[in-house]
Image: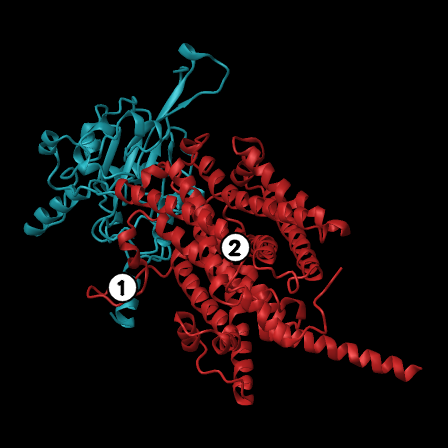
Chain colours: A cyan, B red
C-alpha cells in the first residue's frame, strides 16, 4: 500500500480512450450479431442461464422487474398503424456491450468493474459493495443486481438442482452486481490450453454459450485483432471501426450492402458488439 | 412585536437557557416518544432488509436507485443551512443569528449523520462498506478515485467531522457556564470534561475567537463542495436528466432552501417546547423567513435555467425525460414539487404572514415536502425514461420497507436533535449576552446623542 503502487495500478486499469490505449495484443474479444438471422427464439438466453448459473427468479419477482437475464431478447413492434396479426416487429438480443470506454467502470467507488487487457469489461463479485452506480450509468441497462440471496433460496435453486450448476462459474450472493462476461470462463480455459501449447487461441476454438446455442448462427464471436477471424472479417466488411464514435462508411460500392452498426455509438462508449441491421422486404 | 430586551440581565439569560436543560414542556416527551417509535420501526425494516436482500426496497433491474438515494440527498441538503447561519452569517456580522445558530449547527451535524445512514442502507453489501474508504490493507487495493461516490464519502466525512468540531468549539464558553452552575452528578462530570478547563480569561477568549473564525472559514468552502459533489453523482453520469452542467449550484441552492425551511420548523418547535419565546423572537423569525424567500427564488430561477437549457439544447433524449416528468406517471409529484417549491414560498412575500407562527409552521413543512419531492424527481424519472427503450414506461414504486426507512430517518433525526437540546444549551448564552450588550451600547449612544441635541 503505497502511492507508487497506486500510480502503477492506475495506468494498468484506467484507459483514457481506446485510441490511446495499449494495443489489444494478442486478443480483443468482440461480437457481431446478425439481426437478419435472428428469429427471436430465446435459445441464447436459455443457454446463458445454464452456462452462467443465473438464477431463475420466479414469476412474482419477474413482475417486480427483478429478473436476471444477462442475455435478453427485446421485441420492438412496428408503429405503422397495423394491428396485431399483421403488425411487424423486430428482435434485438441485448447483453453487456463490453464497451472500450465503459461508463460503468469510471463510476464504481471500489473499482469492482474493470477493463481487462483482452478487451473485456470484467466484474469482480468479491469487491462489489452494491452501490449500483454502474447500472445507473450504463446506457444499455444490461447490468443485473442480486436483489435476494438466490443460491440459498429453495424456490430458485432446489437442492437437487445444484447438481446442474456450472462448476467453472462462481455463484453470486445477494448484494452484488453481475452481467454478461462473454463467457470469460471459456475464454480463460482456451487461453490456458493455447498457452500450454505455445500459441494463441485459434479462430473457432472458443465459443460463447449464446453463440453455441443459436440455431441460425446469428451470433459470431472471436478475436477482433486476428485478421483470420470471422468477427474481424465482418467488422471490416461492414466498415465498422472499434475506435470511432462515428463511422465513416464508403458507400460508393453499390453491391456492398452496409448494415453494420453499434448501438448508441454517439455516447462514445465504444461498444465491442456490432449489430447487422435486418433486411426487410415483407411486413413481418 | 417584541425583540430581545436590551435590559435583560445576564444572570437571567443563564437561568432561562439552563432551564431548558431541566424542565421542557410536556410536548418534549411526546415528541421524543414518537421519534423513538419511528426509529425503532426503521431498525426493524433495516434488519429485515439486511437479512432478505435489497429486493425488499422494490427497486428493480433497470431502476436500481430509489427512495434511499433521494432521501440521502434530502438529508445532505438539510445540513447546509446550519453552516450558512453559523459560519457565513458569522463572517457577515449578522447579530440576529446569535440566539439560533446553535440549534442550526446541531441540525447540520445530525442531518449529516442521517444522510450517512442512507448510504449504508442503500448499498447491497452493507457489511463491506469500508471497501470504499482508502484504508491500508494487505492486498494493496485502493478505491476508485475517479468515482463521484468516493468523493462523496470523503466530502461527507470531512464535513461531518468539521461541523462536529465547529459545534463543539462554539459551545465551550457555554459548557463552562453550565459546569459552574450544575449540581454534582453525571451532567456536571460531562460538562467539566467538555469545557476543557475554560475560565474565561482574556487569553482564552482571544484564542477562542481565532479558532472559531478559522473553523468558520474552513467550513464554508466545505459546505459548498459537499453538495456540489453530491450533484456530481448525477452530473458526472451520462444519463439524460442528470447530465446537467448547472447541477452543482442548483443542488447547493436547493440545499440551503430545504435547510432554511427546516430551521423555521425547528425554530417554532424549540421556541415552544423549551420556552425560548424571549430569545427566539419574532423579528428573528422574520429575518429567516426573508432569507428563505430569497433562496426560494434563487432555486426557482435555477430550476428555470435547467429546464430552458434542456429545452433548447437539441438533446432529444434529455428533452424526452423532461417531457416525461411533466406529463408521465410521475407528473403529479413533479408538479407537486413545482407547487411546493416555487408557489408556496410566495406566502413569505406578504408581511402579515412573515411572523404568523401557525402559517409559517405549515408553510415550512410544505417547502420541505417540495424539496424532498425534488430529490425524488431527480432520481426516479431518469430511470423510467433513459437512453435505452427497454427501460421506457417502466415505473417503479417504493415498497413499505422503503417508506418505513424514510419515515424512520425523521425519527432518528428528531431523536438526536431533541436529546441534544436537552443535554446541551441550544441557545448560545455568551453570544446572546454579546448581542444584548452591543444593542444596549447602541441604545445608550443614541440617548446621549439625543441629549446633546437638546
Q: Residue at x 64, y 46 (%)?
A: B363
Pointer 2 indicates a residue of which chain?
A: B
- Residue sitting at x 27%, y 54%: B128
Viewer-side residue, A200 vs A52: A52
**Above/below status of A121 relative to A250:** below
Residue A268 visible (yes or no): no
Location of residue A257 in the rendering, given as x and y in whole percent from the top left corner: 38, 29
Query: Taking the image as drawn, is residue B317 in sight?
Result: yes
In the image, residue B319 above or below residue A45: below
Along the line of sight, which residue is nearer the eye, A245 or B265? B265
Along the line of sight, the residue nearer the viewer: A74 or A277: A74
Q: Which mark is on residue A9?
A: 1
Chain of the residue under label 1: A
Taking depth in this image into account, of B415 and A31 the one nearest to the observer is: B415
Q: CA distance from mark 2 to mark 1?
A: 35 Å
Which residue is under mark 2? B77
Residue B403: % across, % down:
43, 40
Dividing the image into 4 quarters, which one contains the N terminus of chain A?
bottom left
Q: Where residue B96 appears, x then y in whole percent?
A: 67, 67
Q: Is residue B173 left or right of residue A59?
A: right
Q: Secondary structure at mark 1?
A: helix
Amino acid at each position: 500500500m503505497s502511492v507508487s503502487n497506486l500510480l502503477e495500478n492506475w495506468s494498468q486499469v484506467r484507459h483514457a480512450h481506446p485510441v490511446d490505449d495499449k494495443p489489444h495484443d494478442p486478443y480483443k474479444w468482440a461480437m457481431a450479431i446478425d439481426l437478419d438471422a435472428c428469429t427471436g427464439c430465446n435459445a441464447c438466453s436459455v443457454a446463458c442461464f445454464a452456462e452462467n448459473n443465473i438464477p431463475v427468479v420466479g414469476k412474482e419477482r419477474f413482475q417486480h422487474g427483478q429478473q436476471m437475464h444477462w442475455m435478453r431478447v427485446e421485441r420492438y413492434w412496428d408503429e405503422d398503424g397495423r394491428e396485431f396479426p399483421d403488425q411487424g416487429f423486430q428482435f434485438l438480443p441485448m447483453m453487456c456491450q463490453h464497451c472500450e470506454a465503459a461508463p460503468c467502470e469510471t463510476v464504481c467507488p471500489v473499482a469492482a468493474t474493470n477493463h481487462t487487457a483482452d478487451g473485456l469489461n470484467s466484474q469482480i463479485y468479491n469487491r462489489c459493495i452494491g452501490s449500483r452506480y454502474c447500472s445507473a450509468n450504463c446506457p444499455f441497462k444490461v447490468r443485473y443486481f442480486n436483489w435476494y440471496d438466490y443460491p440459498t433460496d429453495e424456490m430458485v435453486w432446489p437442492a437437487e438442482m445444484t447438481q446442474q450448476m456450472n462448476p467453472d462459474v462462481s455463484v453470486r450472493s445477494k448484494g452484488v452486481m453481475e452481467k454478461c462476461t462473454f463467457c470469460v470462463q471459456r475464454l480463460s480455459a482456451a487461453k490456458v490450453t493455447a498457452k500450454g501449447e505455445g500459441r494463441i487461441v485459434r479462430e473457432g476454438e472458443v465459443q460463447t454459450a449464446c453463440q453455441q446455442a443459436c440455431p441460425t448462427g446469428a451470433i459470431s464471436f472471436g478475436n477482433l485483432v486476428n485478421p483470420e477471424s470471422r468477427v474481424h472479417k465482418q467488422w471490416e466488411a461492414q466498415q465498422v471501426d472499434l475506435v470511432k464514435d462515428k463511422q465513416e462508411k464508403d458507400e460508393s460500392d453499390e453491391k456492398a450492402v452496409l448494415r453494420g452498426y453499434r448501438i448508441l455509438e454517439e455516447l462514445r462508449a465504444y461498444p465491442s458488439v456490432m449489430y447487422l441491421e435486418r433486411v426487410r422486404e415483407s411486413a413481418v | 412585536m417584541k425583540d430581545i430586551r436590551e435590559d435583560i440581565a445576564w444572570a437571567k439569560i443563564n437561568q432561562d437557557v439552563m432551564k431548558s436543560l431541566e424542565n421542557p414542556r410536556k410536548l418534549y416527551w411526546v415528541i421524543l416518544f414518537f421519534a423513538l417509535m419511528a426509529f425503532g420501526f426503521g431498525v426493524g425494516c433495516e434488519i429485515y432488509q439486511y437479512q432478505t436482500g435489497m429486493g425488499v426496497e422494490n427497486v428493480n433491474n433497470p431502476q436500481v436507485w430509489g427512495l434511499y438515494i433521494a432521501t440521502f440527498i434530502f438529508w445532505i441538503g438539510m445540513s447546509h443551512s446550519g453552516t450558512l447561519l453559523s459560519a457565513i452569517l458569522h463572517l457577515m456580522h449578522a447579530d440576529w443569528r446569535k440566539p439560533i445558530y446553535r440549534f442550526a449547527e446541531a441540525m447540520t451535524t445530525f442531518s449529516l449523520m442521517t444522510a450517512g445512514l442512507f448510504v449504508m442502507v442503500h448499498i447491497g453489501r452493507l457489511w463491506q462498506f469500508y471497501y470504499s474508504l482508502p484504508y491500508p490493507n494487505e492486498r494493496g487495493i485502493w478505491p476508485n478515485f475517479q468515482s463521484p461516490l468516493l468523493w462523496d464519502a470523503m466530502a461527507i466525512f470531512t464535513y461531518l467531522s468539521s461541523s462536529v468540531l465547529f459545534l463543539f468549539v462554539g459551545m465551550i464558553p457555554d459548557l463552562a457556564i453550565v459546569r459552574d452552575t450544575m449540581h454534582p452528578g453525571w451532567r456536571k462530570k460531562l460538562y467539566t470534561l467538555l469545557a476543557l478547563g475554560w475560565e474565561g480569561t482574556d487569553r482564552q477568549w482571544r484564542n477562542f475567537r481565532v479558532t472559531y473564525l478559522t473553523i468558520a472559514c474552513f467550513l464554508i468552502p466545505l459546505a459548498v463542495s459537499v453538495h456540489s459533489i453530491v450533484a456530481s453523482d448525477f452530473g458526472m453520469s451520462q444519463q439524460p436528466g442528470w447530465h446537467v452542467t448547472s447541477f452543482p449550484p442548483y443542488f447547493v441552492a436547493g440545499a440551503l432552501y430545504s435547510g432554511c425551511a427546516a430551521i423555521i420548523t425547528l425554530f417554532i418547535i424549540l421556541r415552544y417546547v423549551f420556552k425560548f419565546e424571549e430569545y427566539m423572537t419574532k423579528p428573528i423569525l422574520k429575518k429567516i423567513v426573508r432569507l428563505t424567500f430569497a433562496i426560494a427564488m434563487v432555486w426557482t430561477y435555477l430550476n428555470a435555467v435547467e429546464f430552458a437549457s434542456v429545452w433548447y439544447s437539441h438533446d432529444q433524449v434529455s428533452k424526452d425525460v423532461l417531457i416525461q416528468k411533466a406529463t408521465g406517471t410521475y407528473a403529479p409529484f413533479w408538479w407537486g414539487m413545482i407547487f411546493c417549491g416555487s408557489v408556496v414560498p410566495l406566502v413569505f412575500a406578504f408581511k402579515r404572514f412573515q411572523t404568523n407562527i401557525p402559517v409559517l409552521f405549515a408553510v415550512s413543512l410544505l417547502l420541505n415536502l417540495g424539496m424532498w419531492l425534488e430529490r425524488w424527481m431527480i432520481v426516479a424519472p431518469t430511470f423510467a425514461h433513459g437512453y435505452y427503450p427497454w427501460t421506457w414506461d417502466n415505473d417503479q414504486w417504493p415498497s413499505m420497507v422503503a417508506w418505513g426507512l424514510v419515515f424512520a430517518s425523521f425519527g432518528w433525526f428528531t431523536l438526536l436533535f431533541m436529546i441534544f437540546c436537552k443535554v446541551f444549551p441550544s441557545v448560545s448564552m455568551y453570544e446572546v449576552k454579546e448581542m444584548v450588550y452591543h444593542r444596549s451600547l447602541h441604545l445608550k449612544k443614541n440617548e446621549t446623542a439625543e441629549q446633546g441635541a437638546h
